[in-house]
Each structure stands twice: as structure tokens, then as C-alpha cells.
Image: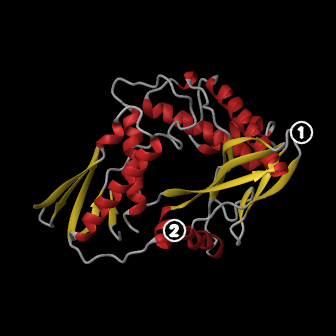
């Protein structure tokens, strides 16, 4: 919508998701890499829970646990990715007041690098939108496969900018489903590419900045988004609520819920843009660790002063607004 944003980190990152389907040997090598990555993550988590004192920096974590992870998945970037994942869980637990020694990994299959780099050595974006991915077989031997994900038209310019501008990025391969069809193994998954937020906004913007002079304050709740519009003298000009209360009903389909929330976000931004708002003020969502416990099993993560599910839900909506507002 071409709106400025205040209240969020000036330097942030965004992850785009590119679905793919593969079969045969490529599927086999992706699965072996994902399983070895998960085993390495389990091992690092187990050892980390035994420590009386854990490092306070990413470098410290890597120095302490890289060798252990590398012994299971012999690729330094993937080994570091497993260590970084466990560090994110630890940071999430500290923020949420959860006992780190009691968490368990969820039912996921994926592997990732741990840092932004150009080109990303182990999950490498090529100019033709292919990804050349380093794989590790169960016997420890290393291979290389090609993934050709489905690229939405609006992402082509963005991916092209990564290669032409040499933008640092981090790759992740997530296995969503797998099985055997016609005696051949298949995998359905996503290549996830994390890039700086400013690169995303620069390449994805469709609207020019408007000529408005007003300010919008956004308050996100579990069933609505509230927008208040004020002028430079802090006088209230307008306010409007964008409801999505139906999605809070028990059993409401998750995919449908986020579709409705996305529509309300778009309506709110469109309303603000066409009512003279130039700058939006958003909450800076609490940082619940790098992955916000998304890789941890569901269970009792309650805290007397902190509802983590509500916080993650609200933070996700704020992130969606952050993605769309400047476009």
C-alpha cells in the first residue's frame, strides 16, 4: 500500500516459500538429509539440556555443539543449522518461562543453513530459479540434487534480484509430505528462502507512496484489527475495526482462517491508504526465539503471566501487516 512503518525493527528478514514435488533418487536424498538433520538436532538438544550453563552467543553455541552435529550430518552449514535451531528453542523457552529441559521436538522433517550468505553454498539459488541442494545420504556420503519449485509470477523479480544484486540469503528445505506411488518414492515440500526485509519491499512494491499526512495506529487482537487515524496534532480523525471473529470458533479450518485474516489485513491497509494515512505505527512483536517454538511438540507451555499462543497468533498477524504495508 506504500505506507511507512514505525515500531518494527529497521533491519528484519522475511521468508518466502516455494513449493516443489520430486520423486525417485532426488526424493530419497532429500529425505535422508532431513532425517539426519533431525537426528543431529535431537542430539544437540539432548546435550544442551544436560548443561548447567549455556553460551550467550551463536558463536558460543556453534563452538560447543558443532562437532556433535557434524558427526551425524557431515556438512558444516547443516550442522550449524541444527545448532542454531536448538539455540532458538532455548531462547524461546527463556522468553516464555518454559523449562528448556522439558521440551521435545515436534513431528517435522527439514534441513537448513544457519546464516545468510551469497551464494548460499548448500542450498544454492541459480539464475533460472532452480535450487542446487547438497544432500547427505544415510551412509554419510554427500550428493547434490536439483529442485525446480513452482515460482509465483510476483516472486520472479525478487529471486532475480537475489542473484543479480548478490543478496545474502538463507535456504531451508521443508518436507511437507512423502510416500510411495507406483513403486516410486515421492516428496512434496517447500524451499524456503530468507532474505532481508528491505530487499523484499524494494522489489515487491506495486504502489507509490501516497500524499497523505495522517498517522495510523494499529492494534491487533485475537478477533479484530483496530485502526485509529490521527493528524499531526494527535487529534483523532477516524477509527475503524476490521473483524475476523469467526476464525476463533473451535474447529474452524486453519487455512480458511488465515485467508480471512489476510483479507482483513488488506482491507485495513487499503482503508488507511485511501484515507490519507502515510505512516502506520505497529507494535514490535515480542521475539519468541528464532522459530518461536514452531519446531517443538504441542503440550503444556502455559505461564501464569504469558499466553504464548495468543502472542504468536498476534505476532503473525503483525508480520503479515509488515509484509504488505509498504507494497
Q: Residue at x 65, y 49 (%)?
A: 114
Please rate how many residues cluster around mark 2, counting C-alpha atoms within 10 Å: few if below 14, some from 14 to 19, many from 20: some
Query: Residue 238 falls in which quadrant of the image?
Result: bottom left
Q: How many labels does the image show?
A: 2
Check the image and report above or below for 154 versus 97: below
Q: Residue at x 35, y 23 (%)?
A: 304
The front one of 138 and 240 is: 240
Badge 1 element? loop
The front one of 175 and 278 is: 175
Check the image and report above or below for 297 versus 147: above
Where residue 50 sits in the image (x, y, percent)? Answer: 64, 22
Badge 2 element? helix
Query: Residue 103 falls in which quadrant of the image?
Result: top right
Q: In the rendered view of the protein, which quadrant contains the C terminus?
A: bottom left
Left/right of residue 204 with respect to residue 48 in the rendered view:
left
Image disc number at residue 322: none
Q: In the rendered view of the protein, which quadrant contains the N terminus?
A: bottom left
Q: Residue at x 22, y 64 (%)?
A: 215
Image disc number at residue 139: 1
Residue behind mark 2 = 199
Say how the picture is coloured. secondary structure
Check the image and report above or below for 87 versus 51: below
Amino acid at each position: 500500500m506504500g505506507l511507512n512503518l514505525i515500531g518494527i525493527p529497521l533491519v528484519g528478514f522475511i521468508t518466502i516459500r516455494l513449493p516443489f514435488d520430486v520423486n525417485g533418487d532426488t526424493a530419497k536424498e532429500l529425505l535422508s538429509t532431513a532425517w539426519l538433520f533431525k537426528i543431529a538436532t535431537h542430539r544437540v538438544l539432548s546435550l544442551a539440556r544436560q548443561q548447567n550453563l549455556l553460551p550467550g552467543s551463536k558463536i558460543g553455541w556453534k563452538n560447543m555443539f558443532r562437532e556433535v552435529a557434524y558427526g551425524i550430518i557431515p556438512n558444516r552449514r547443516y550442522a550449524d543449522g541444527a545448532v542454531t535451531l536448538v539455540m532458538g528453542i532455548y531462547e524461546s523457552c527463556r522468553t516464555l518461562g518454559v523449562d528448556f529441559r522439558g521440551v521435545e521436538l515436534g513431528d517435522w522433517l527439514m534441513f537448513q543453513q544457519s546464516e545468510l550468505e551469497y551464494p548460499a553454498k548448500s542450498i544454492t539459488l541459480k539464475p533460472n530459479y532452480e535450487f542446487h541442494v547438497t544432500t547427505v545420504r544415510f551412509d554419510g556420503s554427500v550428493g547434490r540434487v536439483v529442485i525446480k519449485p513452482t515460482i509465483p509470477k510476483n516472486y520472479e523479480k525478487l529471486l532475480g534480484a537475489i542473484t543479480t544484486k548478490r543478496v545474502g540469503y538463507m535456504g531451508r528445505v521443508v518436507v511437507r509430505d512423502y510416500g510411495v506411488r507406483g513403486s516410486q518414492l515421492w516428496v512434496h515440500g517447500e524451499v524456503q528462502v530468507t532474505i532481508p526485509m528491505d530487499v523484499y519491499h524494494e522489489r515487491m512494491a506495486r504502489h507509490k507512496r501516497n500524499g497523505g499526512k495522517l498517522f495510523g495506529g494499529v492494534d491487533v487482537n485475537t478477533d479484530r484489527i483496530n485502526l485509529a487515524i490521527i493528524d499531526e496534532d494527535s487529534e483523532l480523525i477516524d477509527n475503524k475495526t476490521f473483524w475476523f471473529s469467526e476464525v476463533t470458533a473451535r474447529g474452524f479450518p486453519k487455512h480458511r482462517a488465515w485467508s480471512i485474516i489476510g483479507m482483513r489485513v488488506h482491507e485495513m491497509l487499503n482503508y488507511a491508504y485511501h484515507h490519507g494515512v502515510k505512516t502506520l505505527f505497529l507494535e514490535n512483536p515480542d521475539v519468541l526465539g528464532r522459530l518461536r517454538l514452531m519446531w517443538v511438540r504441542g503440550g503444556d507451555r502455559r505461564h501464569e503471566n504469558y499466553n504464548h499462543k495468543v502472542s504468536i497468533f498476534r505476532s503473525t498477524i503483525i508480520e503479515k501487516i509488515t509484509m504488505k504495508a509498504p507494497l
